[in-house]
Amino acid sequence: MLIAGNWKMFKTPSEAASFCRALRESIGDVGNVDVAVCPPYVALANAIAELAGSEISVYAQNVHWAENGAFTGEISTGMLAELGAAGSIVGHSERRQYFGETDETVAKRAKATIDAGMKVIACVGELESERDANETEAVLARQLAPIVSEIGVHERLVIAYEPVWAIGTGKTASPAQAEDAHAFIRSIIDVPILYGGSVKPDNAGELMSQPNVNGALVGGASLDVDSFVSLCAAAAVVA
Ligand code: 13P
């Protein structure tokens, strides 16, 4: 089971360093749970340095598919690898909504990261209007198609199911809704599948005990050390 904290655009390099120091001291024994943090680019080096030699890994939040080139504002897999990042998130709904990310560019980012020997957490998920229109499965199938054709099942590929209506809203998918979506995703691509969307220490246990839920991608509740540690501990109970 993987619990990954997506910090989004929170924490400066020095804040990241003190968070990672505290996390390392307080995480304790989380058994079968793999723990990761995903800081902003500028805080990656500090997080990696503070967590060196620990079991906690560090991922970026996005990565470009080209090795280098005229792509202002982008970062390549080679740059992340040299820093010591374990991999990257790609296709987060905030990137799709606000930065023009498409199903195809998400798959290209994912493929390049896998090809660079790193791990990928590729995000999919429907809008509330799509769920209301009974289009959830069609949307997931459409988002997954280029990932399946570019990569397919791979040991370094993880999918995160993040229903957009549950992100940062406190409106968590019910365990049954998450399980249904995860089972559908698994019927398309059988890799570990994380749930994301208002995961908190008090709902993590129930969500993580669904058979097709293999971990969580956590936003808000990953920004505070105590809350992130208790969430990891709750997951460890059912892992
Ligand atoms: P919240 O946990 O804040 O709802 O965010 C979920 C998310 O987007 C993780 O990538």
Image (cartoon, rainbow, N blue to C red):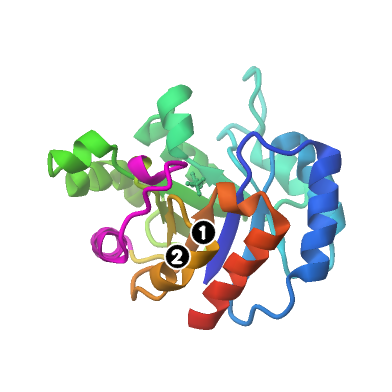
Q: Position of residue 157 (x, y in %)?
A: 48, 58
- Residue type, numbered disc 1: Lys
- Residue type, numbered disc 2: Asn
Label 2 packing within 10 angstroms: few (<14), some (14-19), many (20+)? some
| Residue 136 covered by magenta stretch | no
Q: Give whichever of 209, 115 is nearer the camera.
A: 209
Q: Which residue is mark 2?
A: 203
Residue interval drawn in magenta: 165-189
Q: Which mark is residue 200?
A: 1
Q: Main secondary structure of the magenta part?
A: helix
The reply, left or right, for residue 187 in relation to residue 38 is left
In this view, 146 is above or below 217: above
Q: Secondary structure at mark 2?
A: helix
Q: How many marks?
A: 2
The residue under the point 35% across, 73% down is: 210
Q: Is mark 1 within 8 Å of ligand 1?
A: yes
| Residue 167 covered by magenta stretch | yes
Q: Position of residue 143 (x, y in %)?
A: 31, 42
Q: Position of residue 79 (x, y in %)?
A: 74, 39
The reply, left or right, for residue 20 in relation to residue 221 is right
| In contact (CB < 8 Å): disc 1 and disc 2 | yes
Q: Position of residue 155 (x, y in %)?
A: 50, 66
The residue under the point 23% across, 60% down is: 184
